Amino acid sequence: MILPLFVVLALQGTPQAAVAHAVAEGIAGGSFPGAVVVVGTRDSILLAKGYGHFTWSASSRVPRPDSTLFDLASLTKVVATTPAALLLVQRGELDLDQTVQHYLPDFQGKGKDQVTVRMLLEHRSGLRAFLPLNKLTHTAAEARARVMAEPLRWAPGTHTEYSDLNMMLLGWIIERVSGMPLDQFVHTQLFEPLGMTQTGYRPPRADIKRMMPVGLWHGHAIQGKVMDQNAARLDGVSGHAGLYSTGRDLAHYAQLWLRHGALLDGRPFFRPALVAEFTRRGPVNRALGWEMNDTTETVNTGRLLSDAAFGHTGYTGTSIWIDPTRDLFVIVLTNRVFHPRTGWSITRLKRVRGEVADAAVGMLDACLAAVASRAANSC
């Protein structure tokens, strides 16, 4: 019988050592130069640590969970756009079963009158996955018009296709309903109330030095420029990408979902019923905005997270998984897109994520065992 890596290492040391080993293997394999891992429960942090460096140079900075800014890429979909939609639903200002055309009349074309807001969140609108807007258009206004005019590829509600276009549209719906630009809405209505002080779009130039690089240009690390070129075409603010954050801020966010929408002091922020609705498994292992854990696969989530776990990944090398059954979250942030030294960087990163997730479960189990033996007060 072949034991999972975290079990082997736990026999030699601790689950924390298993995390360190998995990340070190990812760095040594050339997948990414640096990473931040944060593991915790609804009210505790079990591990928060940075590994490696900003670049392949050992003289560059070591990433920090509390201050290093990561380009979240598609985590934007579940850290900004999805909770913004949930908040507007909670306020009675957004109807998930209303048509997109009701909010965006310029969303015209055959079959589009049947596309609902819920279908955008489920990725069942019938739209294709991607458009190279940076090549097809020259301005943010042109890019928006191009998405609005994009024809459906499938009948609404009949096919699941993970699509950036869905979340672009949802971002524009949020702006129309709230009367505020998306970046302003999520800053004032979500991140400030949640204490996520280092999360947002278009970070100021003063923060460039603490941003993980996302590329190399003539030997110089690229910092402060969003990796996603469609988000860049949309002036850095979009429902599908463009958000920056730290490991610590994302931990606060994950804990909110583990507490069924309650703040640390117990005050409700999201209604528990809406949290349950947005994280209920739907077609093809998807919920509303979130991806559900596929327990038949071990990539990204390992072997031990429950089938109730939900999360998301980002192209730049970011991921967040939240397991309400185990009361556990696992955040792995890397800059996989910075000049990888292997042609299999995403494959190696997926393996690292799975091993870290399994080690996180081992960490929690060890903590619970310590509580049971009265060696500690809580996890």
Image (tube, helix red, strand yellow):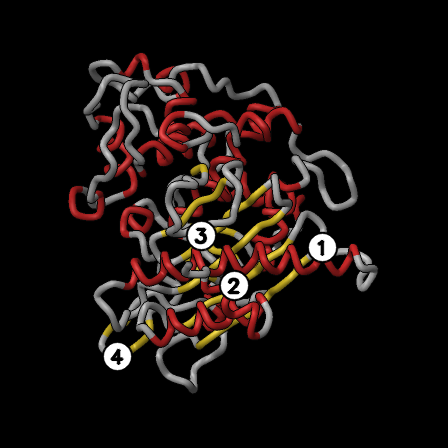
Callout in the foreground (4, 2) = 2
Asked if the residue under mark 4 is in contact with the one under mark 3, i.e. CB atoms within 8 Å, the reply is no
Residue bearing mark 3 = 302
Q: Which quarter of the rendering shows the N terminus?
A: bottom left
CA–CA distance in space, label 4 to label 2: 41 Å
Q: Quadrant of residue 165?
A: top left
Furthest residue toward bottom: 59
Residue flagged by tag 4: what amino acid is it? Gly
CA–CA distance in space, label 3 to label 4: 36 Å
User: x and y percent of residue 60 in the render?
Assistant: 43, 82
Asked if the residue under mark 1 is in contact with the one under mark 2, i.e. CB atoms within 8 Å, the reply is no
Label 1 secondary element: helix
Furthest residue toward front: 1
Residue 219: give its label.
Answer: 4
Q: Nearer the viewer, residue 320 or 29?
A: 29
Residue bearing mark 2 = 7
Which residue is at 42% across, 67% downward? Answer: 212
Residue bearing mark 1 = 368
Mark 2 and mark 3 lie on one chain; the one further toward the N terminus is 2
How crowded pointer 1 is (Cα within 10 Å; few <14, some 14-19, many 20+) is rated as some
- The answer to whether 356 appears left or right of 365 in the picture is left
Mark 4 and mark 2 lie on one chain; the one further toward the N terminus is 2
> From what the image shows, is residue 134 above or below residue 280?
below
> From what the image shows, is residue 30 above or below residue 199?
below
User: x and y percent of residue 77 in the render?
Assistant: 43, 41
CA–CA distance in space, label 1 to label 3: 20 Å
User: x and y percent of residue 47 in the render?
Assistant: 62, 64
Mark 1 and mark 3 lie on one chain; the one further toward the N terminus is 3
Label 4 secondary element: loop
